[in-house]
Each structure stands twice: as structure tokens, then as C-alpha cells.
Image (tube, rainbow, N blue to C red):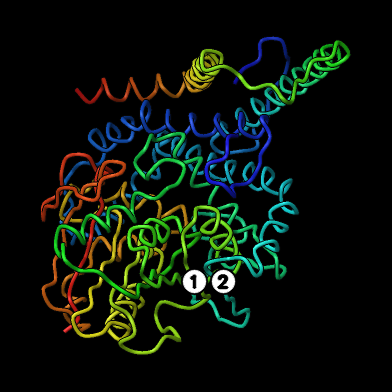
Amino acid sequence: MSDPGLKGETKFFFEPKTIDILLAMMMTLGSEISALSEKLDTVIDLLEAGGADVEGFTPSPAQQARRDAARKVLIETLLAPFQHEADALARQKE
Amino acid sequence: MPQFHPESPNISADSLARLRFVADFRKQLHAGLSKGNRAVYDRYFATPLDLPLAQRREKLREQMETHPFYQGWSSMLRGSQDLMWRLVDNAVAVDRERLAGRLADLAGTARGSVRVNPELPGPEYITQADTHRMPGGYMADSAPDDLRAGALYDLGGAVYQFGVGNISGGLLNDSRGRTLLAHLATRFPDFTPARILDMGCGVGHNTVPIATGFPDAEVFGIDLGAALLRYAHLRAEGLGARVHFVQDNAEHTAFEAGSFDLVVSQIILHETSPAAMAAILRESRRLLRPGGIVMHLEVPLRAENGDDFYNMMMLWEEYYNAEPNISGVMDADLAGIARTAGFGEVLLGYQTIPAAGSRSSAFSEQPGGKAFGQWLVLSGVAQ
């Protein structure tokens, strides 16, 4: 994991260094989730100020299907580097 | 989350969203990525080893554990399971007091019962590790109204259904009990038991369909975990099934000899030990009257059904997920153990999961194509 914006050697604490990279990814995800939570909290406050029942909302089948599809895309995106590895291994086999 | 039975835990929309994520994540690990493991095996480790089957399996695991793809895949599968349990635990903790209140409300009105024995010692195969890495394990019991282990197991089982479709009977998780009813109908269509015991019943996922299938029978479910049984009682009453739940050990119960017509278990043998499997079969025989029937259902993993890679991957849950006797079941001469225990007309084979509402399905002594479209059933008649 070379970072062109930094001078000097990057110390990796784990062998393999993939673990250092994964911990970095985890913290990135955490910061994204924290930001999303705050944004959502704002949206809920605004909606409830207008009388909406956010917690009591039940998605319609079409809305749920849209959410299911979005979740699937997110998971495939998250796992994409690993999927590429699986695909490459499977190709080598042939 | 919609109720998946009348007494299921109430969980928030946020918890449900998190659990859906974990379920879909695991589904993608299996569906999209697991081919990488096969490729690693074929490319690097498929050289036949001149060793007995069990040692080949172990050696292959050691080899696979050196490859980064297998390491990453296994780490994520195990990690996602641990995440699932944490999420489930947080989700049901919120509903703890309401569920305990529902249990208290049953006093005096229940059709069935629950009787726990806090002094019951746990066998080593249950106490040495938390089976499936479920926090606290099966025997965690902190108070006379503790339902946590039951709620965890029930909701965790339901989450598994999100990811894999309907193989275990949907959110009621009752395909195994229904498969045993179909097996009984296949082999002994005129048999009507008056007294039935379900060993290692957990939260009664499969005791309930059996009790419903024989509504006039007196049905008992035993398990080592008190909180599982309290929850099972609450759940069964909600589903209108009359079951008596008792905390006891399937290797040596407190029931009288010859006091049952039918003794069953579902997917408990692979969580015990080779010695315990034999003891459970002997105890099954002791509890049955002559002519009584035994049926033990298991996951359809037999060493003779697959190659080295299959056998190694089938043991994934034993290596990393605290299911200590999977290899014991895979390798065992189950029919021989049953005959030694005193059973005749012993049959070992694969019973297809019946369609919803049906009590019949196909049975074959050879495995079918879909690994989880059927269950392995060992059955016999007490001599």
C-alpha cells in the first residue's frame, strides 16, 4: 500500500499487510456510516416536525424490492475486489 | 420485522436492515465467491495424497489455510456470522422484558409446560465452546425468566432463511420436523404414536410440527438449555402446539424405560461426540417400547458422497464454527450404531423435504442432486 502523498516508509504492523489495509477500510466505513447517520437524523427531525411517522413507516413491496436491489449492488460493490480474485482463480484453473 | 410466529421478538426496522445486509452478504460469499476455493484446490492442492480419508481432509485444510483467498473467504464467512450474532443479540435485548412478561402470562393457561433443572451438568461437547459461536452458548441461563438463548437461536435461524431461501422451512424453520413426518409416513404409514420424545429440541422448531401432526399424542421435548426451553414453551403455545419441555440430557434422561412410542432428534448428533452418538442411540432404545420407532435426522453430509475438496469444505463448520462432531457424523457407520443399540429394520437414507402442507415426499438410500433439498434420516424399530 504505497501512498504517493506521503514521504517516508509506511510501517505495516501485520503480516500479511492486508490486515492493516482492512483495518483502514473499516475505519473509512465507520466514518461514512457516522456521516450518514447524522444526515439521516436531520432528515428524520425535519420530517417529524412536519408530522411524519418515520419509525412507523412500512415500505410497499415495490419499495422493499428497490431496497433489496440496492443492498445487493452495495454488497457486490463491497466484495468486488474479492470477486475479481475468485474469477481470476477460476480462469487460471481452465 | 413482521412477526414470524405469534410470540417472535419485536425488532426495529434498523435491526432488520442490518440483518438483511448480513444475510445477503453471506449469500454472496457462497453464491459468487466460493468458486475461488474450488479453484485454489484444483490449481494448487488437488494432488492425491496417499493417506486415509480423514488425514487427507486434515492435510488439505492445512494446505488451504495457507492460501490468501481461502483465508479471506473464511475470515469473512466467520466474521459475518459473529456480526450476525452481535446484531441479533442487540435486536432481541430491546424486547427482553416484554417477552419475559409474555412467558409469565402463560402460567395457569398453557396447554403444554416447561420444567428446567438448573443443576443439570453440561457435557463437554456443549460446554467447551459456544456452538455456532452463539454468544453464551446453548446453556446460558442468568435468571428464572431468561429467554435470551432461545430468542438468539430463533432469530439467528430466521436470518439464515433470508439468505438461503426456504430450505429450512422459512421463518418457522420447521422443515426437519415435517421431513420426519414424511419419513414416518413413507416407512410406517399406519403408525400412530401416543407418546413422543424430541431429543435436543432447542426452541422447538421441529417439535411443533410433530406435535401438530399428531395432535392426540403426548409430546415431550428435551434440551440442555433452560433459556432455550422457556422460549420454546412460549413459542409453542403461541403456535397452538401442546408440548412439554424438560431440561434433560439425551444421553441419559430421567424418563422411564419403555415409556415412548416414537423418539426423534434433528441435527443434534453433529453437535455431540462419537461416544455421545452411541449413547443417544442406546438411550433412544431404552426409552422405546418394543416395536417403537426411532428417527434421527442429520445434515446430508456423508464422506462417501464427495471428493476430498467436498469433504474438507463440509468440515468448515467443525473447524471454525464450533460444531464439534461433523466429522464424527460424516464418517460414522450410523446404521451399525443403531443395530448395536438394539434396533432392527434399520434404514439410512435421504428424505426429500415435503412441500408445504404435504406429509409425503420421496425417500432414497442414495443422495439426490441438491444438498439441502433433503435431509439424512436414520430410522429403525426397537427390538
The secondary structure type at the circle numbered 1 is strand
Q: Which of the numbered marks, if any, corresponds to residue B114?
A: 2
Residue in the image at 51% along x and 19% along y? A68
- Left or right, B358 with respect to B126, comes to left
Mark 2 → mark 1, Cα distance in angstroms: 6 Å
Determine which quarter of the picture holds residue B225. Answer: bottom right
Earlier residue among tags 2 and 1: 2
Give the position of the N terminus of chain B as an image quadrant: top right
Question: For the residue labelled by badge 2, is the local secondary structure a helix, a strand or a loop?
Answer: strand
Q: Say left or right for B178 vs B81.
A: left
Crowding near the residue tagged with mark 2, few <14, some 14–19, many ≥20 C-alpha atoms within 10 Å: many
Seen as rendered, the residue at the extreme right is A49
Q: Nearer the viewer, residue B100 or A23?
A: B100
Contact (CB < 8 A) between labels 2 and 1? yes
**Residue B96, image x, y percentages:** 72, 52
- Which residue in the protein does label 1 denote? B244
Query: What chain does badge 2 belong to?
Result: B
Residue under the point 14% across and 52% down:
B363
Which mark, residue B337? none
Give the answer, above or below, for where B261 lies relative to A88.
below
Q: Residue B176: x percent and y percent? A: 33, 53
Give the amino acid at mark 1: His
The answer to whether residue B59 is visible is yes
Residue sticking out furthest to the bottom:
B257
Labels 2 and 1 positioned on one and the same chain:
yes
Is any part of residue B310 visible from this angle? no
Q: In which quarter of the image is the C terminus of chain B?
A: bottom left
Amino acid beneath label 2: Val
